[in-house]
Amino acid sequence: MGMSQHFDHPNPVREMEFSYHDKATENKQIIICNVCKTILRKVIAFIGKTASKEEINQKLDRICQKIRISGCQSFLQKYKNKVVNSLISGDKAGTICIKLKLCKKMDMQTIQ
C-alpha cells in the first residue's frame, strides 16, 4: 500500500470544468431570457393593448402556431396564467420575463 493518493489538492481539470459549466449556465440563462422576450414581444404585438382576459387566453392558445418559435408551447403551458395577468397589467416583455425569473435585471442592460 505504499502509494497513497491525496484528494485534497485542487484538480485543475475539475476547476476548468466548473468554469465551463458556469459559462454554459450563464449562456443558457441568456438564451432563455431572449426566448422569453421574443415570444412575449410577438404575443404583445399579436394581442394588442386592449384585449380582455378571455381574448388574451384565446390568442395565447393560437400564438405558437403563428410565431413558430421552438419552446413556445412549453413556455406558455408553464407560465400562461402569470403571462395573462402581466399582459392585463400592461407590462412589457422584459418586465414579464424578470417577473417569471427567466431574465435577471442585469440581462436587461446587456440585451435589449
Image (cartoon, helix red, strand yellow):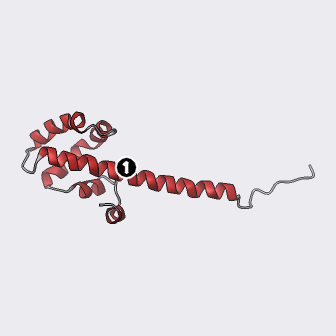
Query: Relative to 91, is 47 above or below?
Result: above
All told, the count of numbered labels is 1
The kind of residue on which mark 1 rests is Ile
Residue at left offset 29%, top offset 36%: 73
Q: Quadrant of residue 15?
A: bottom right
Q: Is residue 12 left or right of residue 29?
A: right
Residue 72 pos. (x, y %):
29, 39
Q: Is residue 82 left or right of residue 53?
A: right
Quarter of the picture containing the C terminus is: bottom left
Residue nearer the viewer, 78 or 46: 46
Q: Would you say residue 79 is visible in this rendering?
A: yes
Residue 1 pos. (x, y %):
92, 49
Q: Would you say residue 84 is visible in this rendering?
A: no
**What secondary structure is found at the residue carrying circle 1?**
helix
Residue 31 pos. (x, y %):
39, 51
Query: Relative to 62, is 84 above or below?
Result: below
Residue at left offset 82%, top offset 54%: 5
The residue that disc 1 covers is 32
Residue 75 pos. (x, y %):
31, 41
Mark 1 neighbour class, 10 Å CA radius: few under 14, some 14 to 19, many 20 or more? some
Residue at left offset 35%, top offset 60%: 104
